[in-house]
Amino acid sequence: MSENLAINSLLKEDLKQYIVKLGEKQYRAKQLWRWIYVNGVKSFNDMSDIGVNLRNKLNYEVSFNRLDADTHQISEDGTQKWLFSLKDKRKIETVFIPEADRGTLCISSQVGCTLSCSFCHTGTMALVRNLTADEIVGQVLSAKDSLFDWGSKNRKITNIVFMGMGEPLYNYQEVTKAIKILLDNEGLCYSRRKITLSTSGVVPIIQKLKKELDVSLAISLHAVNDKLRNELVPINKKWPIKELLSVLEVYPGVNNARRITFEYVMLDGVNDSIVEAKKLVSLLKPIHAKVNLIPFNPWPGSIYKCSSEQTIKDFADEICNNGGIIATVRHARGQDIQAACGQLKSNSERIGREKIKNINTT
Ligand code: SF4
C-alpha cells in the first residue's frame, strides 16, 4: 500500500501511467484530472463518472494532500494569510492579495530559506527543507478551497507569484513540476504570463529556466553596487551584479510585452539616493526591464527603516521620467497581519543544511 502517494504530486503523464498500472483505461486519468483541478473535488467518492472499483483502489492508495491551515488571518485591507501545516508539522505561509483587476497568490517554495537577505524576515530563519511539488500545488488548491474559488467564471486567484518563503531556484526540480501542473490547460490552466518566479539571482538556473518553463521572471536586485548587494542579498558574492545582468540581457523571449521585473526594496539612507536611481537606470538600460519599488516593511528586530514617501517618489521619478524605465511602487498590503513582502516567517525549527536534498545549482 503506497499511502504516501499524493495525487497532486503527479504530472498528467505520470497520472496516466499510474492509472494504466492499476489496470484501468488511460482516459480515466483525464477524468480524474478534471475533477481535481477544474472542480476542486477532494474525495474520490464524489467523482460520479469514476467506477466504484477504481474509486476503491484510489481511496486505498492515494491521498489528496490538501494542506491544513493552523491559522487563517484576514487583514483589514482584504489580504489573507494562511499558516499551513505540512505532514511533518513544518509550517509555511501563503498570502492572497486581492486587487480591483486581479487576485495574486504568493506561495512558498521552501520552509525557511537558504539565503539570508538582511532586509527579509524569512532570511532570519534557517532553511528547514525544500517543499515537494504536491506541497507547492497544495498551497494553491487549499487557498482555492478557502476562497471558494472553484467552478466560477470569475476566478479569484488570477496570478501566482513565487515570492513567499524560500528561493525557488534552489528547489528547481519540485518548483518546475509544480509549475507544469499549474500550467496544464485541462486543469488549473494558468498562463505563463500569470505565473511569476522571483529569484535572488541563481545565475546558472536562470539560464535554463526560460527553455523549460518560460514563466515571468522577477529579480530581487535591491542594490546597484556589489559591496551593498553582498550585504543585502548575500548570494551576490557568488553571482555578482554584472554576471547576473549579463545573463538577463540575453534572456530570450523578453520583449516589450513581457519585461523582467526588478524588485528594489527602499531602505532609508542605505540604497535610496538619486545617484543610485541613476545607476539603476544605466544598469537596466540593455534589458527589457521594469522596476518595482518596495517600501520596506519593518519586522521585529530588523535594522532598517523604510525610506520616506518623498524619497520613494523622487527615486521612482528618476527611473521613470528621467530614465525612461517603467517604475511602480508596491503598496504594502496586509501589514496588520505581517503578510507584507519580506515579513513572512513561521516558527519551524531548524535542521541542518546538510539534510537539504534536491538543491541544484549546477
Ligand atoms: S528575500 Fe527571498 S531569497 Fe532572500 S532571504 Fe527572503 S525569502 Fe530568501
Image: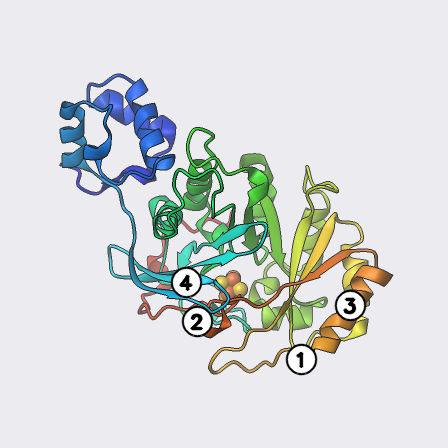
> Is the residue at mark 4 in contact range of ligand 1, meaning its CB lies under 8 Å from it?
no
Label of residue 81 in the image: 4
Q: Residue at x 56, y 54 (%)?
A: 198
Q: Nearer the viewer, mark 2 or mark 3?
A: 2
Q: Nearer the viewer, mark 1 or mark 2?
A: 2
Can the viewer see residue 304 in this picture?
yes
Q: Nearer the viewer, residue 70 or 215?
A: 70
What's the CA distance linking mark 1 and mark 2? 23 Å
Crowd tier of the residue under label 3, counting other residues whose Cα lies within 10 Å: few below 14, some 14–19, many 20 or above: many
Do tag 2 and tag 4 residues touch (Cβ < 8 Å)?
yes
Label of residue 337 in the image: 2
The x, y position of residue 92, in whole percent, is 36, 61
Could you say which quadrant of the image residue 6 lies in?
A: top left
Could you say which quadrant of the image residue 324 lies in?
A: bottom right
Question: Between disc 1 and disc 3, whose residue precedes?
Answer: 1
Crowd tier of the residue under label 4, counting other residues whose Cα lies within 10 Å: few below 14, some 14–19, many 20 or above: many
Q: Residue at x 63, y 63 (%)?
A: 330
Label of residue 268 in the image: 1
Q: Secondary structure at mark 2?
A: helix
Q: Is residue 160 left or right of residue 143?
A: right
What's the CA distance linking mark 2 and mark 3? 31 Å
Q: Is residue 184 left or right of residue 250?
A: left
The x, y position of residue 185, in whole percent, is 47, 30
Label of residue 360 in the image: none
Query: In the rendered view of the protein, which quadrant contains the N terminus?
Result: top left
